Amino acid sequence: MAKQFPSFDDNTRGFAEAQHIYFVATAAADGRVNLSPKGGDSLRILGPNRLIWRNLTGSGNETAGHLRENSRMTVMWCGFEKRPLILRAYGTARAVHVGDVDWAELNSHFDAHVGARQIYDLNVDLVQTSCGYAVPYFDHQGHRETLDTWSDGKGEAGIHDYWDEKNRVTIDGKPTGIEDYI
């Protein structure tokens, strides 16, 4: 039942943009595979083979550490509310940090957020759909304000202190590169 495409088309792009949650998977050469749920207004499809998603400060920083060793990334969406569909975008990504040359241009696609930590720029080489018939129904009740409130309360200096304390290495002890931006 799976169908594969070399890029996003109007149908797959529309489905992805309509979802309230997506999942991102990365892995370094060894150690743990990371799979993270993402939400909010944090993803943009910029073209048939390019998407970006903005990562907000959180408890871990696995994706940044993994991409330093291995650029593979998969992004997945599931149709929880209506259409039974699973959509995956496969490709290679790079981390763009707050101080990088192209940060301002990429970050301009999103509303300002004090907790913005990286933007991941994914070059998509395969888009795949599958049926999603076993994915249960869930109703979206809204955006959680908890992370926004926490970030605002910390402020920029507090966020950078948090990066220094909690985001320098992955759970496997691999460097994330954040130290250059603290």
Image (cartoon, rainbow, N blue to C red):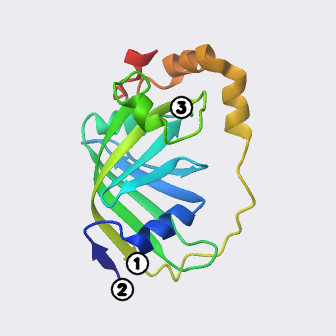
Q: Label 1 to label 2, Cα distance in Å?
A: 6 Å
Q: Nearer the viewer, residue 35 or 118?
A: 118
Residue 127's x, y, as percent? 32, 67
Task: Look at mark 2 in the image and give the residue it sits on.
Answer: 1
Q: Secondary structure at mark 1?
A: strand
> Does residue 112 appear to the left or right of 176 in the view shown?
right
Give the mark toward the camera: 1 or 3.
3
Task: Look at mark 1 in the image and give the residue it sits on.
Answer: 130
Q: Nearer the viewer, residue 68 or 117?
A: 117
Q: Are marks 1 and 2 in contact (CB under 8 Å)?
A: yes
Q: Secondary structure at mark 3?
A: strand
Q: Is residue 123 above or below residue 15?
A: above
Q: Secondary structure at mark 2?
A: loop
Q: Label 3 to label 2, Cα distance in Å?
A: 38 Å
Residue 180's x, y, as percent? 37, 16
Q: Earlier in the sequence, mark 1 or mark 2?
A: 2
Three-letter residue code for mark 1: Ser
**Which quarter of the image is occupied by the N terminus?**
bottom left
Q: Is residue 24 above or below residue 149?
A: below
Residue 48's x, y, as percent? 32, 61
Q: Is residue 172 visible?
A: no
Q: Quadrant of residue 9?
A: bottom left
Q: Nearer the viewer, residue 166 or 128?
A: 128
- Name the disc covering residue 116, or none: 3
Identify which residue is drawn at 67% across, 70% down.
138
Numbered circles on residues, count: 3
